[in-house]
């Protein structure tokens, strides 16, 4: 997590290996309008409560971490809360965030069934709104369908802008996988990438996981990345 005022200096999350996530590296596909809005929020040019939702592998975490990173580089006060780590944090963390410029909350669906977290988020939403600051949230389901017990929160989540993050086409997946490979300093031919896309789950997270395995296996075996090599690895 990237931090601002000293009141939140004890929040334990750091970007770690995800620091490469930035808005420039997000291949937008059909999400151009969303990307432009996030850039303006990260530069504090616009203030919004923004709800992103979509299937796994559409890059929601990438976008939230990228907003956090860019805002931090501009010396704004910002925090990123990954709710997948709900068991490691206390709801009291939300009480210290209302004065920040931007708060990004990832994996919102993880607090379904947790009324204290939903109440805390309601308070935070109101506080950020009253202070003229931004709240960017992500979930795998739309705000109308998210299974929250506090109806007041569900209604608030739809008050401002809601975007469904569009999944990448196969052509865009090829570009994304080539970009990821270049970041890891190895090359994948279009033929190898097309073979991977045809043979495994089309979910982008799964494809990137396969990419990681190919990277490690090719280094260990000191072999060129070919279709037969990848075929053996997948099998």
Image: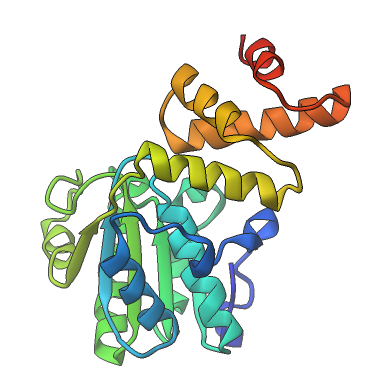
Looking at the image, can residue 57 be seen?
no
Q: Residue at x 52, y 85 (%)?
A: 77
Location of residue 223 with respect to 157 vertically, above or below: above
Looking at the image, can residue 4 be seen?
yes
Q: Residue at x 43, y 51 (%)?
A: 59
Q: Residue at x 51, y 72 (%)?
A: 68
Left or right: where 229 falls relative to 170: right
Left or right: where 152 falls relative to 18: left
Among the 4 quarters of the image, the one containing residue 36: bottom left
Of the 4 image quadrants, the one containing the C terminus is: top right
Picture coordinates of residue 48 (x, y %)? 27, 79
Of the 4 image quadrants, the one containing the N terminus is: bottom right
Location of residue 178 with respect to 211 vertically, above or below: below
Q: Nearer the viewer, residue 14 or 99?
A: 14
Among the 4 quarters of the image, the one containing residue 128: bottom left
Picture coordinates of residue 25 (x, y %)? 53, 62
Q: Nearer the viewer, residue 118 or 144?
A: 144
Q: Residue at x 59, y 50 (%)?
A: 179
Picture coordinates of residue 112 (x, y %)? 29, 45
């Amino acid at each position: 997590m990237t931090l601002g005022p000293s009141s939140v200096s004890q929040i334990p999350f750091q970007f770690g290996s995800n620091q490469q996530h930035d808005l420039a590296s997000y291949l937008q596909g059909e999400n151009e309008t969303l990307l432009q809005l996030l850039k303006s929020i990260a530069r504090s040019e616009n203030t919004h409560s923004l709800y992103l939702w979509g299937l796994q592998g559409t890059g929601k975490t990438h976008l939230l971490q990228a907003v956090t990173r860019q805002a931090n580089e501009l010396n704004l006060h910002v925090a990123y809360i990954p709710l997948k780590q709900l068991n490691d944090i206390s709801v009291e963390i939300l009480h210290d965030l209302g004065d920040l410029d931007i708060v990004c909350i990832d994996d919102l669906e993880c607090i379904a069934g947790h009324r204290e977290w939903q109440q805390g988020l309601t308070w935070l939403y109101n506080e950020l709104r009253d202070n003229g600051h931004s709240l960017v949230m992500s979930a795998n389901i739309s705000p109308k369908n998210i299974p929250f017990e506090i109806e007041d929160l569900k209604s608030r989540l739809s008050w401002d802008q809601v975007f469904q993050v569009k999944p990448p086409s196969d052509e865009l997946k090829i570009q994304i996988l080539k970009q990821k490979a270049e970041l890891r300093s190895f090359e994948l031919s279009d033929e190898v990438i097309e073979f991977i896309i045809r043979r495994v789950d089309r979910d982008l997270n799964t494809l990137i996981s396969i990419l990681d395995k190919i990277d490690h296996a090719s280094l260990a075996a000191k072999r060129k990345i070919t279709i037969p090599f990848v075929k053996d690895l997948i099998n």
